[in-house]
Amino acid sequence: MRVGVAWECPWVPSSYGKLSLWLAAELQRIGFEVRIYCPSAPELTLYSNKLIYAPHCIHRELGVCVELEKPVEVYSDKWLCEDGDVDVYAVCGSPYGEVESRWVSKCSTSSKPVAGYFVTESAIVPPILAQWLLHVDAVGFPAKAVARAYLVHDAVREVHGEWVLAPHGLPEYYFELEPDEVVDYGLRLYGHRDPGVELALESRRAGALYATVAKNHPRKDFGAVLSALAMLKARCRQELLPGRNCLSTRLLLGVVEAAGAPVWNIDMAVGALGLERDILLLEDKFRKTGVSEFFLVFMYSLANSFLFATLGEGFGLPPVEAGAFGRPAVITRTPVTEEVWEGYPLLAASRPVLSPDGFVLYSTDYADFAGKAESLLYPDVWERASKLARGVAEKYTARRMAEGFAKLVELAAEKRGTKQKHPLPEYRVSAPGYAEMLLELLGFART
């Protein structure tokens, strides 16, 4: 069977770019032909309308590489749902997003089965947006909480009561690399040209180097992370923390401007909190172009702990990646992170809030986030959390993701003809009981 996957291009340094590559590799291993359609691929090359892609791994010696059974065909998304030799199409992402909604709309008229592999950052999706699921034959989600966010609406649940769980997952090398070996390799590669490297190593030896890497985006709460570090430094001055750890506490901060919708003035926030000497920032070239897979792995390995403050996630891949290296993370508590990190003690308290776009997101409790970050300065707490984080990561493999995705593709083939053409004759802007559900979610008891 040939499956056409509409997602990010497999060479793009982002979570979606990596997942499309990892998924393609594992789908090939279980017998699928894979074709990827993506927005940054050229519409036309000199002799063809596709690229034949396989990653050229410059860090193969270390083991940071994904091996494809054979090169994958990559087309511009302009060709999506136009190829007769594709058996099932699969659209991935948020179905109401600017790019993805265009994909869903176009594929809704296809005679071929179309699957939707959908995410959302909202704890419950507004009815008019949830109805995008009516334009595909079958749906799958990376978490049960994401499924609930869409399927609370009767009209959607009636069509997609049967759905597939396919959690995001990591390739094998995440579980095979040793952090110290990665750091040694990186130091040989980069040398000690940047004085920030020596500061990072000093903090690492003290067990006091935190890391955060995320795109500059409204959903990423850099304020919680920076405030936590400011609180730790204040407690240091008050001599309330272990001296050696306290003096060496720093944050390796990766803010990527290459993607997202920049809203955070990081330099202003760092200056306002008096953290200029305590923040180790990515070089400008990485901030503007994105972080390579090796450099991301290097950051996880270099740091002792990971900080992940977020207003909402469809899965939340970075803390799972860090956990594979035994790096415990402090994570904002949301319905998705509660599910992925079930029973994990370092989920920071939060409260649901209604955002300007009608989503229910989660506001991090800064004090609780900071307190949990502080706890990781104590070796016994860190050791326990490290083992737990590794255990969580081991549940989420690329193979498991591909197996779930295969079930989704098969379900779409079985339900062929279910999808409705876009646009619908009418979209419901409200749904029975939606306001009551929303109020209950926000903490107000039903009356």
Image (spheres, grey):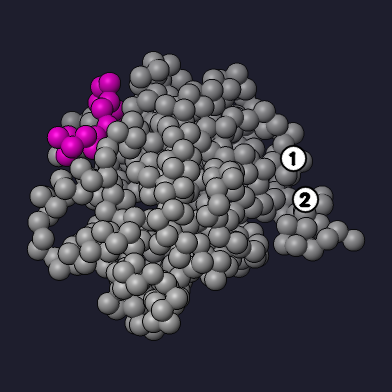
Answer yes or no: is residue 45 visible: yes
Name the residue at 18% across, 62% down. 197
The majority secondary structure of the magenta stretch comes to loop
Residue 35 in picture, x, y percent from top left: 36, 28
Answer yes or no: is residue 80 visible: no
Between 163 and 35, the residue placed more toward the observer is: 163
341 sits left or right of 277 in the view: right
Between 99 and 220, the residue placed more toward the observer is: 220
Determine which quarter of the picture holds residue 306: bottom left
Name the residue at 23% across, 46% down. 180
Q: Is residue 268 above or below residue 316?
A: below
Q: Which amino acid, mark 1?
A: Ala
Question: Dot 1, how many residues are within 10 Å of its Cα: few (below 14), some (14-19), or many (20+)?
Answer: some
Q: Which amino acid, mark 2?
A: Ala
Residues at marks 1 and 2 touching, judged by CB atoms closer than 8 Å = yes
Q: Which residue is mark 2?
A: 431
86 sits left or right of 76 in the view: right
Residue segment shown in magenta: 59-77
Asked whether residue 130 is drawn in magenta, I would say no
Q: Earlier in the sequence, mark 1 or mark 2?
A: 1
User: Does dot 1 land on a helix, a strand or a loop?
Assistant: helix
Image quarter hosting the N terminus: top left
Determine which quarter of the picture holds residue 150: top right
Name the residue at 54% across, 23% down. 407
Between 264 and 209, the residue placed more toward the observer is: 209
Name the residue at 55% across, 48% down. 344
Residue 24 in picture, x, y percent from top left: 36, 29
Q: Is residue 389 above or below residue 70?
A: below
Between 265 and 259, the residue placed more toward the observer is: 265
Which disc, if any, is residue 155?
Answer: 1
